[in-house]
Image (cartoon, helix red, strand yellow):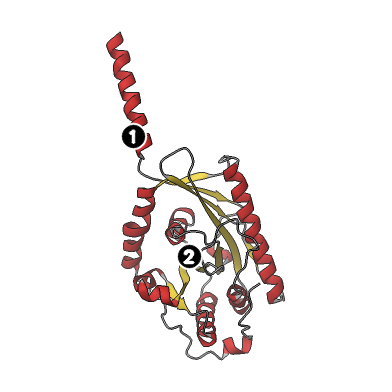
Amino acid sequence: MNDRLHITQSELQNAQPLTPAIPAAKNALGDEAIYWLFARWSLWNFFDRVWLQTIGPLPHPSRGPFIFYLNHSSWWDGYLMAVINRLALYQRFDSYLMMEEKQLRNFRFFTWCGAFSVNRRNRADIVRATAYISRLLRARTDRALWIFPQGQILHNDQRPLVLYPGIARIAQTVEHVTLCPITMRYEFGGKQRAEAFVRLGPAHRLQAGIKAPALMDDITQRLINSLDALRDAVVAGDTSNFRVVLRGRPGIDQAFASLLRFLNLVRKKQAR
């Protein structure tokens, strides 16, 4: 566990102001525009398929609020997260995303989707960001935080898996919260375009009285288990427990195969 900045509950309770440097600025039209013009179009254009495996019951607001914690192995993760939110969770949650302040300043329009900033090198800002999202989550069970606790893009199979402790601080501050691992993997099979694989769940409730180090160990191990299970299924080519949630446009290989099938059909008709 990476605990270079130990934040106390007293600091969180007394945090002033209760907003990070860049708070979320939810905008329904802006959110839809980002999804359709950036995420959905890009995934359709560059990927063959997006596969989803759900482990356990699908997360529901009646069990919320939720913290969805994801591995971070690619630039594509943010776009895939938007697809998961819509095509797997059906936008059941009022979602928020913790995002590095420097990055969010460059792409401030992501605040329309619920992104808010955190500066992991500034203790006071960590306190404000944690207090801010904790307050939002406590207010409604249909709210959810999406977080990449690795804090940087790293290979799926890199071990040890090191996570920032912010997720534990937030969960303990909210108290009555459900956590859910989501892992993602990208692979080139026998086609021109890559395929994305997602494993969602199983969700787990925060144990009452659990200490931060034990909680971080539990979250880390659950993320590792999910990453390993997803890798094993993909390497084995076993998609029996997956469903396709998004199909991309045909690649050159598929277009050429369709052309060959058409030409063969024409030849057979001419030979009769």
Nearer to the camera, 242 or 191: 191
Q: Which mark is residue 210?
A: none
Is 212 above or below relative to 267?
Answer: below
Element assignment for label 2: loop
| Disc 1 secondary structure class | helix
Which residue is painted at 57% across and 86% down in the image?
12
First of labels 2, 1 by sequence position:
2
Q: Position of residue 200 (x, y in %)?
A: 56, 55
Which amino acid does the dot numbered 1 rest on?
Ala
Could one spot residue 221 in this view of the protein?
A: yes
Q: Is residue 49 visible?
A: no
Question: In the depicted view, which residue is nearer to us: 251 or 35?
Answer: 251
Give how far apart the Cα atoms at labels 2 and 1 are.
Answer: 38 Å
Q: Look at the image and tell me in which quarter the N terminus lies.
A: bottom right
Amino acid found under the numbered disc labelled 2: Phe
- Image-quadrant location for residue 165: bottom right
Count of numbered circles on the image = 2
- The residue where tag 2 is placed is 93
State which quadrant residue 217 falls in: bottom right
Q: Report if the CB atoms under discs 2 and 1 are less than 8 Å apart.
A: no
**Quadrant location of the C terminus?**
top left
For label 1, the residue is 255
11 or 202: nearer the eye?
Answer: 11
